[in-house]
Amino acid sequence: MPLFHIHGLIGALLSSLAAGASVLCTQGFHARRFFEWLEEYRPTWYTAVPTLHQAILARAAMNRKTLARCPLRFVRSCSAPLAPRVMSELEEEFHAPVIEAYGMTEAAHQIASNPLPPRRRKPGSVGLATGVQVAIMDPAGNVLPPGQTGEIVVRGASVTPGYENNAEANQDGWCGGWFRTGDQGYLDSESYLFLTGRLKEMIIRGGAKIAPREVEETLLVHPAVAQAVAFAIPHAKLGQDVAAAVVLRQDAFTTRMEIREFVAQRLAVFKVPSRVLIMKEIPKGPTGKLQRIGLAEKLGLVPSGEEPGGRKAGFVAPRTPLEKALAEMWAQVLGLQNIGVHDDFFQLGGDSILATKLYSRVCQAMQVQLSLIRFLEIPTVAGQAWAIANSQHEVPSPALVPIQPAGSGLPFFCVPAETDVMGLLELGHFLGPDQPFYALHPGDLAKGRVLYTAKNAAAHYLKEIRSLQPEGPYLVGGNCAGSSVALELARQLMAQGQQVALLALIDPVLHGYFYRTVRSYWQSLSPFSPIEKLSRVFGTLRGLMGNIRQEICHRVLLMKSRIRLSAGRALPFVPPDVGEANRRALRIYAQQAYPGRVTLFLASGLLSGLRPSLDPKVLWRKLAKGGLDLHVISCDHNSILGFPHVKDLAEQLRACLDNAVKAASDKQSGVIAV
């Protein structure tokens, strides 16, 4: 602990000197050197805030021999609430009691502390009063009985009589001779003090008070979460909402959605964070404590509302050249003016397609290669500027969207059904942080600059892929209609003498509305009322007419394009329907053999009510001359990339990726599997 802080100065240094003990003062906190210091100096105890304890815990398993040789008498924690899980893990690793205490500068540090064994210490409690009197007071100044929650107040010889040159704080800080700590808590029947939150940090969501500590302790129960802080973010209707930032354990992995689901199973729905940020490090104060107040602003999560006259409340104009450049790109993409650094992209009318467009522009203009997952986690100019400033500066490919660029293994290249690559975000999350994963975006092809076809798209992607990975083996995939481009891409790679170790097709729909017989289609409508049946039949007919109309328009456009090309004239600027073009190509490819092996992931809902001749398993076995590996996911077509089914898909796909890489490696080294 730093010696400019009351915890380090009184709780560590002067308390040790008063007891006649020696003190080791380091140049700062270095978790990697902590265990070297244990070995060299053999201390009998140490004291820290919870964030430092967590950093030490992250390395404790690798240093258990040192801990066995250098036992501690106890470990002390103070200055911030210690989660019961962290306390339990500390005691398990150090084989020593953890003494949680409560203190503040105005009380010359210590107010309460859990006693050493054999006396009882209570997890979640900061112990018994030490040297001062402690009580719980309501807003009217009445002292409350045990078990009731209110503001913690203290008095005694170590409590300051007042603040210098601050009459307002002196008036507000005392009540009937008691100093008001600003902390909320209660005393149990044995006078043990329990903290429930900081009054100034309390989140008031639609009138309901939420203690950040309760949310944090729930988050820390998650096996993948190492650190967590809950804090308030502004909300236009509720006043405030709950947000959380978490740091994952080393080698652990989870997603924002899974964390929210985990919390929702343990807390009331209004306490579940609406925003979860997964970060490498949470901003801390100079003493190592996590700071909730102002964290939303630091992380760029403060949206702006409207004041009378159209002016944005809390509007903050771009302050740096980077923020100004980003704000200009936002304005172009959203068709708006006066973008503030704390405006939320999605609250301003942005959607997934516009977000992908913005992401592509930012990566090319800023000469950076950011993970799409990371880029969208903080949808403000300030947050994105911070992410760019802390990123590795590289020139990205306009066609390769790095969903998850980290990891040292072979990258997996996947073609989405249309131009929206955001549908692959959750799949990237669950494939894990060590599996490089790139989505393929058509770029200029989708702008109508050149005629879009599956062959043109595959040729475009092939150049970009080989610039990133010059030689095989390659891992290629496609989702839904994007499977047509993936098939063509695999064909072109093989034509260039490259090895395609895996071609993974995720629920490719070959025949659209003609998958079902009329009888099986009518049977599928049996659960619905007559009016609903009629509505669904009309919807199907409208879809069929739309397909016919699109087919006619496509053929007319193709004919006009051929006439223009033969006459040496430029093509008209007509943005194509990439999804429809891919679906049309997939129906064509379904009649052509593919020389390699296909790994097929099908939604179980796609297999019900089909004629045997239209069974996709039968069709793909005819198509894949090198063999077919089939995996069935228990869901329907529209939910295969959504939670929780995407988790099952990712687990099976990851196993296929690993097996394909191993098989390719064995083939190159001459190993024959029997």
Image (tube, rainbow, N blue to C red):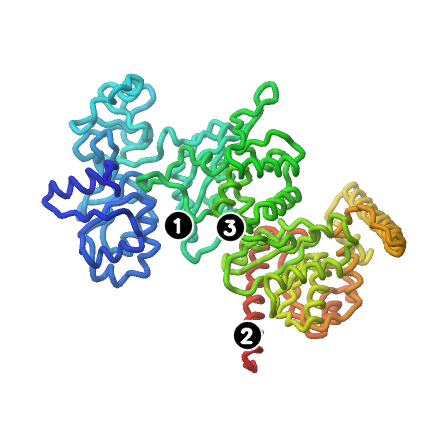
Horizontal arrangement in the rendering, residue 45 relative to residue 346 (left or right): left
- The residue nearer to you, when weighing 321 against 211, is 321
Check the image and report above or below for 674 versus 349.
Answer: below
Quadrant of image for the C terminus: bottom right
Q: Secondary structure at mark 1?
A: strand
- Residue 665 is marked as 2
Which of label 1 and label 2 is nearer to you? Answer: 2
List x then y, in percent, for residue 595.
Answer: 72, 73
Check the image and report above or below for 674 versus 455.
Answer: below
Q: Which residue sits at x=61%, y=53%? A: 401
Quadrant of image for the N terminus: top left
Q: Which residue sits at x=74%, y=70%? A: 623
List x then y, in percent, for residue 590.
Answer: 77, 65
Kind of residue sitting beneath label 3 = Thr
Q: Residues within 10 Å of mark 3 (few under 14, many from 20)?
A: some
Q: Which residue is identified by label 1?
A: 226
Mark 3 → mark 1, Cα distance in angstroms: 14 Å
Kind of residue sitting beneath label 2 = Ser
Horizontal arrangement in the rendering, residue 357 relative to residue 226 (left or right): right
Mark 1 → mark 2, Cα distance in angstroms: 36 Å
Q: Which residue is identified by label 3?
A: 255
